[in-house]
Image: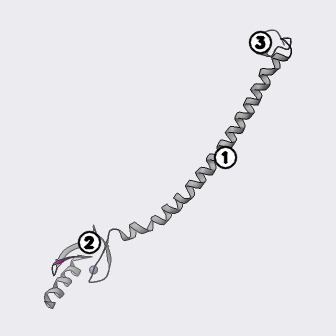
């Protein structure tokens, strides 16, 4: 059991008290390390929670706003909101209007020429 394998460093007949000192110190350092790691984890977890929650709320709050309002234009003939990329743009009585279809655009031009 004591003849020269891995246990040689913990030899008991090696100067009495001085042998157990470093081992206990190492154990204390290990425990300190574990406590510090535990506290560090606790702190980082609470920080992550603290910062993650408001960001999530902001993301949820922002989502419907710009997408719904950003690129929609109103067709003045049928009062439909059309995405700007799909809308038909035409100048009616000097200013640009957007329409959902050619029919609405033609009707707007017809009423404009009738009115003037
Ligand atoms: Zn329309």
- 96 in the magenta segment: yes
Spot occupied by residue 4 in the image (x, y as percentages of width and height): 78, 9
Mark 1: secondary structure: helix
- Circle 2 packing at 10 Å, graded few (<14), some (14-19), many (20+), is some
Answer with the quarter of the image where residue 2 lies.
top right
- Image position of 57 (left or right of 97): right
Cα gap from disc 1 to disc 3, whole angstroms: 41 Å
Residue lying at 50% horizontally and 64% vertically, measured from the top left:
60
Cα gap from disc 2 to disc 1, whole angstroms: 54 Å
Residue at image mark 2: 87
Mark 3: secondary structure: loop
The tag earlier along the polypeptide, 2 or 1, is: 1
Cα gap from disc 2 to disc 3, whole angstroms: 84 Å
Residue lying at 16% horizontally and 86% vertically, measured from the top left:
112
- The span picked out in magenta is 93-97
Q: Main secondary structure of the magenta part?
A: strand
Mark 2: secondary structure: loop
Residue lying at 67% horizontally and 38% vertically, measured from the top left:
37
Residue at image mark 1: 42
The answer to whether 13 is drawn above or below residue 80 in the figure is: above
Answer with the quarter of the image where residue 31 lies.
top right
């Amino acid at each position: 059991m004591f003849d020269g394998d891995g246990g040689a460093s913990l030899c008991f007949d090696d100067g009495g008290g001085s042998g157990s000192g470093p081992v206990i110190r190492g154990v204390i350092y290990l425990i300190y390390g574990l406590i510090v790691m535990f506290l560090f984890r606790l702190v980082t977890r609470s920080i992550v929670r603290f910062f993650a929650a408001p960001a999530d709320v902001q993301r949820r709050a922002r989502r419907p706003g710009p997408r719904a309002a950003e690129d929609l234009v109103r067709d003045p003939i049928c009062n439909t909101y059309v995405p700007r990329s799909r809308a038909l743009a035409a100048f009616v009585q000097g200013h640009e209007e957007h329409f959902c279809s050619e029919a609405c655009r033609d009707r707007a031009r017809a009423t404009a020429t009738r009115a003037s």
